[in-house]
Amino acid sequence: MRIIAYIYTDPLLESAPDSNIWGWEIDRVYQDLGGRQQLKQLFKDCIAEPADYLLIRRLEDLGDSVAEVCDRISEIESLKIQLVATECEIPQQLQLLQLLQQIQYNQRRDRIRQGHARNRLKAAPPPGKVPYGYKRGKDRYILDRSAAPVVKDFFEQFLLYGSLRGAVRYLEKKYGKKISVSTGQRWLTNPVYRGDTAYQNGDVISDTHVSIISREEAAQIDRLLRRNRSLPPRTASATRSLAGLVVCGECNSPTIVTRVTMTRKKQEYLYLRPHKCPLTPKCRAIPYQEVLQQTIEKICEELPLAVAAINSPNIDGIKQKFNQEIANKQGILDQLPEFIASGILDVETAELRAYKLRTEIAEIKDKLAQLPPVNLQMVAQAVSIQQFWLDLSESERRFYFREFLRQVKVRRVDGLQTQLIFIFD
Ligand SMILES: [Zn+2]
C-alpha cells in the first residue's frame, strides 16, 4: 500500500508545518510554498507509480479557485486514489455544494488576508480608521495639518505637567476637542504618533511615516506613565510639587498637603500631614516650604553623584551594542535591492526578509528607549543649580522632581532632616 501526502502553505499567512504531522507512515510528502509545482509533480508521479491514499490538510489546498479544486478532486478520483483530508471532512454528494461554497469563502478570506499581509510587508498603513492627527496618503499616513498640532499640544501638556486628565481638559478648553481619558491614554502609547505602525498580529515596524513626537519625548512619556502608575491616583495630578513624594521618616506614612490660612494675616501655610500614621501620639505635620527648600538643596548636591554612579560604561556599552545591531540589520535592508537585481532573492522573499528586519529593528529601538536618556549626565548638571529650581512654577517643578525622585523621607531630628531616594537608586 502506497500512501502519499501533500502540504500547501501560503508563506504570507503561515509557516510550513512539520512534514510529520500526519500520524501515518507516509511514503512521500510533496510540499508547496505559495505555488503548486509539487502538486503537478505528484500527479505525474502517480501516473507512473499509482498511490492508494493521498493525505491533505484541507480541500482548498488543492487549488486557488473552486473550479481548480474540483478538477483536481476528479483527477484524483480517476487515478483511483483515496483522498483523506485531516482538517476537514470530505463530503457526500449532497453536501458538496455547501462545501464548495465554504471553500470559496475561505479562499476569498485568505485573499483579503494576503492583501493585508502584503501591505504589512510594504509597511503600508493597516486597514481601518486613520488615527486622529493623520490622513491616509498614497502608501502611508501623512499629517493632517489641522489635527496634528492639536495632538502635538496634547503631548506637550502631558510632558510638562505629567497629568493625563489635565492634558485631556486642556484639549477641550483650548481647541474644543473632546476626548475621553482612555482615548488620551491610548494616544500616549500609540506607536502611530511615534512614527511606527502596529499591525493586528502584534508586529510593530518603526519609521513608517512622519512622527508627531520624537523618540526622546516618547521615552519620557513611557517613564512618566510608569512613574504615575506607582503613585496614588489623586496625587499624580495634584498641584503641589511635593505631593505624593514625601513620606514621614518616623512611621513611613505617605503625606498629604494641607493648607492653613491665617485669617488676619491673609497668609497661607502649607503642611505635609502623615495621614496614615499608626503611632500615638500621631506624628506632627511637617512645614511644606522647609521640606521644599531642603529638597532643592539636596537635589543640587546629590543628583550629579547619583547620576554619575548609574551612568557607568555599562549603559553606554548596551546602547552601543543595540545601535550596532540596528546598523547591521539596516545594512542588510540596504542590500536587499541589490540581491533582487542580481537574482539572488526574488521580490517576495526579499519583502518577507525586509519585513522581519524592520520588525526586529523596531523591537531594538523600543529597548533602547527604555534605557535612561543618553544625556542624563548633562541634564543632571544643568538642573543641579538652585536657581533653576527656584525659577520654576510648582507644576514645572513637580514634573522635574518626578524625573529624578522616587521618594522624599523627612525625619524630625534637630529640625528637619530630608533624605532623597532617586528613581535610579
Ligand atoms: Zn507617624
Image: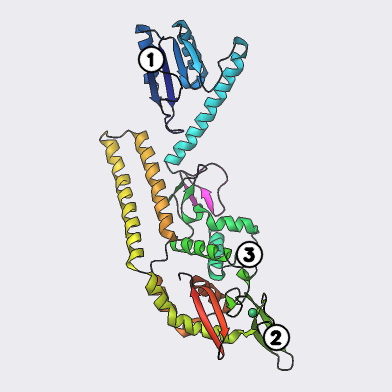
* Dot 1: element: helix
First along the sequence among labels 3 and 1: 1
Residue range of the region highlighted in magenta in the rendering: 124-145
The question of residue 174 being in magenta is answered with no
Q: Which amino acid, by three-letter code, is at mark 2?
A: Val
Quarter holding the N terminus? top left
Q: CA distance from mark 2 to mark 3?
A: 27 Å
What residue do we see at 74% from left, 94% from top? 264
**x, y percent for residue 223:** 50, 64
Q: Is residue 143 visible?
A: no
Indicate the amino acid at tag 1. Answer: Leu
Q: CA distance from mark 3 to mark 1?
A: 65 Å
Of all residues, the one furthest to the right in this rendering is 263
The image's mark for residue 165 is 3
Q: Is residue 101 left or right of residue 342?
A: right
Residue tagged 1: 42
Residue 204 appears at what percent x and percent y? 46, 48
Determine crowd level at label 3: few under 14, some 14-19, many 20+ residues with C-alpha closer than 10 A. some
Coordinates of residue 366 in the picture (x, y in percent): 43, 55
Q: Which mark is residue 260?
A: 2
* Earlier-in-chain disc, 2 versus 3: 3
Tell me the SS state at disc 3: helix
Q: Is mark 3 within 8 Å of ligand 1?
A: no
Secondary structure found at label 2 = strand
- Amino acid on which disc 3 is placed: Arg
Q: Dominant secondary structure of the magenta stretch? A: loop
